[in-house]
Amino acid sequence: MRMSGADIVLECLKLEGVDIFWGYPGGVVLPFYDRLPSHPEVKHVLVRHEQAAAHAADAYARVSGKVGVCLATSGPGATNLVTGITNAMMDSVPMVVITGNVTRTLLGRDGFQEADITGITLPITKHNYLVMHAADLAYTFKEAFYIANSGRKGPVLIDIPKDVFIEEAEFEYPDTVSIRGYKPTESKAVDVAQVKRAARVIDEAQKPVILAGHGVIQSEGGTAALRQFAEKAQIPVLTTLLGIGGISEDHVLSYGFMGMHGMYWANMAAVEADVVIGVGMRFDDRAMGRFADFNTKAKIVHIDIDPAEIGKNFVTHAPILGDVAQVLDLLTPEIAQATHGDWLRWIDSVREEHPSLKMPDTTELTPQFVIREIFEATKGEAIIVTGVGQHQMWAGQHYMFRHPRRWVSSGGLGTMGFEVPAAMGAQAARPDLEVWSIAGDGGFQMTLQELATIVDQKQPIKFAIMNNGFLGMVRQWQELFYRDNLVDVHISQPDFVKLADAYGIRALRIDDKTDVASAIAEARAHDGPFLLDFHVQEAGNVWPMVPAGASLLETVESADEVKV
Amino acid sequence: MAGREARSATLHTVIALVEDRPGVLNRVASLFRRRGFNIESLAVGHSETPGISRLTLVVDGANTVVEQVEKQLFKLIDVVKVADITHLPIVARELALVKVACTIANRADVIQIAQVFRADVVDVADMSVTIQVAGDEDKNDAFIELMEPYGIKELARTGRVALTRGIAEPTKVEEDEPEEVREFHAQAGRRPKKALPFVSD
């Protein structure tokens, strides 16, 4: 059937099962928006800034497991997406990003609102396309969705000049994709020899430990496969920051997350282990501490879908290339049953001696206390979206996750301001679940314009701002590593309650511990968005901590232990 | 010379077969820059397969992890095949054009040295001769060194190109594009006869 490029794009989205996407109109995408009302099956959410469209699509993908889609116009619209695309790239989130560009004849001539977005996004996309003919659109979209959501997932950008939206072409959506240069790992059989070699290494282990990453959650059936694997040989499971939820945190083998602000006992277990089994993770510096000093005795088993991650940061003794569930389904029957009782008891004893999740001993209102209260109220069933900084670490520490895809946080890129637009995407993916956006007073001010979108969409998102008047994590570093020389970390803010009121959102300010539970109850009882402005203690830093560039062995639990 | 020998011991020859599409060189170059890979030389041209270009890279294993170069290259969607052929029997050549300053008095000396290197004189002018020398880098280095006393006015060198010896074809595209895909691209004008309009690179 013959139709315009704009119609082809919308037909492609429908055939890929896209029912919602986030975007912002502008000159060159007008031919596309003109056709939108004719395709009511695809819902468009008008955001207030393109960065938010990308973050919303990103969070939607993390929570739903589907590909997130966003759209922006050329030039500034496209460049505003850059942070959001990079965020998805760093955390391997499947996304298809559509941008408009100037008419073909103006490309490369610095036309009004022209930006070389395929050039700009080269290093921050898994792949990108500039589509020069409407006849190429269908094929390109098929490839883009396939590339985004297979192998190591990631964002794919499609740049479409204005007149390609208008140009007519025959529309036929291909059934299959064949790309010579792209054969994702899961399409090939797992190497059985690799599995057997890894099983031997695991069977010989006295003190094995599993480091579970984002790949466990992204792999279909990954969390169940991980549990069975861990249970068979009674191997303790630590997660990375993005691996949180890969195993239920009340499981007896779950020992929390490791790394810079991970659990003390988790870091000690990682450096004391004789076999380290990385599952769907990339041995990132924030998780592993100083590479040279990370457990030099341990043998490393590494299960990952991306061949380039094998051996990138550490010498791997037994690599297994493949999708987490596919690999573990083969590996679990190969390993011997074991109990590792002494080893588990050793970690338990470290946990008793170094309880990392202590509540600060103060009458002041603390973020830790608030997050614990949110956890208690929601019984660990809510989706928790965070920004980046102290509140993010405290949320990771004090909220106990029982399910995958309920912890939505910017890991690799560390994007402040993620908390507001990501909450929109998370809520769109799971309208049936309660979504809490735990925000910092700094990050919240970066993207708070999206409160308007949330009101538009009638999304009952609950905001909990950990308002300490500081860029807390930066201050923590200035205190500890820059001789307490506080520079530009004291940040002013508007009255968030009045601000919320201006947007038509109900809000409360909370100063006392005793008011926290009732405020949370009131927010939960309200069937629309609600903002809680928690004026928490100004001081207070995140512990434990591995100072930047230090080894996990140097995990410290208070400021007194930090050597500058 | 000793330094050069030591260095060439760590040099790797890596072949990448890539889709002949706009922007592909940009993708490769961007990857190297971003990951801090040091490239000694890069040569690109058509391969035996239509629509596929052949990149020959020389990477110094002393300052770059060659395995990462291969793996990261292979992650690019437009890269069809990557092979480190350093440890295979290969024929490797580079070409140099050297414009040497000379007078009527010493022109014969220059040409005589060129003949020893089986190099060709491709241009003769009043005050210079231009010599084309082909061979491995060491041979070309040695020739250029011998020309230096006369005065090198201009020098152009290609990167290394290499093929494996004999019937081994580790750098051949095994899987051809399916007929319907090729047909589709042709029909869609995606691989037109004439050049595409200006695109991002």
Image (cartoon, rainbow, N blue to C red):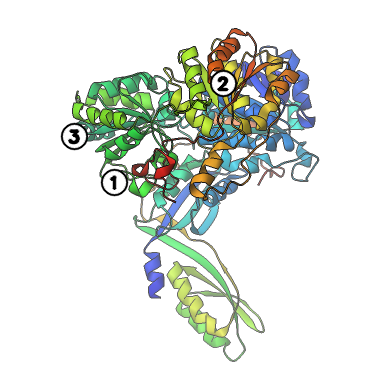
Instruction: Please give left or right for residue B41 compared with residue A168 in the image.
Output: left
Q: Nearer the viewer, residue B79 or A217?
A: A217
Counting residues from the N terminus, which is met first, the one under dot 1 or under dot 2? 1
Residue type marked 1 = Thr
Chain letter for the residue marked with disc 1 in the picture: A
> So how many labels did they put on this image?
3
Which residue is under mark 1? A296
Q: Is residue A428 above or below residue A286?
A: above
Which label sits in the foreground, 2 or 3? 2
Classify mark 2: helix, strand or loop: loop
Quarter of the image for the N terminus of chain A: give it.
top right
Q: Residue A474, how many percent across, how many down?
A: 55, 41
Which residue is under mark 2? A512
Which label sits in the foreground, 1 or 2? 2
Q: CA separation, marks 2 and 3?
A: 54 Å
Residue A273: name its quadrant.
top left
Residue drawn at 41 percent across, 43 percent down: A560
Which residue is under mark 3? A204
Q: Residue A8, how many percent across, how many down?
A: 68, 22
Residue type marked 3 = Glu
Chain letter for the residue marked with disc 3 in the picture: A
Q: Is residue A375 above or below residue A194?
A: above
Residue type marked 2 = Asp
Q: CA separation, marks 1 and 2?
A: 48 Å
Q: Nearer the viewer, residue B179 or A22?
A: A22
Q: Residue B84, how many percent across, how many down?
A: 40, 51
Q: Crowding near pointer 2: few (<14 within 10 Å), some, many (20+)?
A: some
Residue A425: name its quadrant.
top right
Q: Is residue A175 above or below residue A490?
A: above
